[in-house]
Image (tube, rainbow, N blue to C red):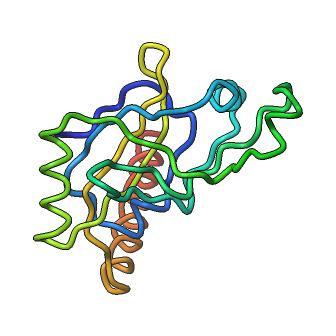
Amino acid sequence: MTESKGPPPICENRRARYNYELLEFYEGGLVLSGPEVKSLRAGGGQLHEAYASFSKGELWLVGAHIAPYRHANVQGAVGYDERRSRKILMHASELKKLKQARETQGLTLVPLKLYWRHGVVKVGLALAKGKNTVDKRETIKRRENERATRRIFKGARG
């Protein structure tokens, strides 16, 4: 699958593009409670330290931060865990393919963004390979060269 531009994200993990070489892109539904959905509508989510992991044959989003909804019932919010694991819903064939790629090729499942699709929260995932320091430097050089070329061409149009 290829990554599409699609709907605007609720939150993004922009650091993932720097730390990983993204190979294949996937989409899955996220199981959330009502106040979590309302909190995401208000912009209360982060994916900075999140990752996807398999447990008992199911895929889980671990470490994603969803702030408590401030208008939620106070009694229900007392035991609220902002970083609890949340289940990712995908087709069984996709789960099998992802699990196999993780085990055989040593790839990582990285959550890239959360976004709305037809009123449902979706998570964009990528099968990724970790970059080493040399690869990161090359990424920085390439980005700076592209920025310089754009600046030159923009100035040439005058």
x and y, in percent, of residue 150 in the image: 40, 51
Side of 153 where 36 appears, left or right: right
Q: Nearer the viewer, residue 2 or 55?
A: 55
Kindly identify the residue that appears in the image at 78 percent across and 32 percent down. Answer: 69
Q: How many marks?
A: 0
Q: Nearer the viewer, residue 143 or 80?
A: 80
Q: From this view, report whether residue 29 is shown above or below residue 81.
A: above
Q: Quadrant of residue 145?
A: bottom left
Q: From this view, report whether residue 34 is shown above or below residue 111.
A: above
- In the picture as drawn, the residue positioned furthest to the top comes out as 118
Q: Quadrant of residue 28?
A: top left
- In the picture as drawn, the residue positioned furthest to the right comes out as 74
Q: Quarter of the image containing the N terminus? A: top left
Kindly identify the residue that appears in the image at 25 percent across and 57 percent down. Answer: 127
Kindly identify the residue that appears in the image at 20 percent across and 73 percent down. Answer: 106
x and y, in percent, of residue 143 in the image: 39, 64
x and y, in percent, of residue 124 in the image: 37, 41
Kindly identify the residue that appears in the image at 38 percent across and 80 percent down. Answer: 137
Q: Quadrant of residue 26?
A: top left
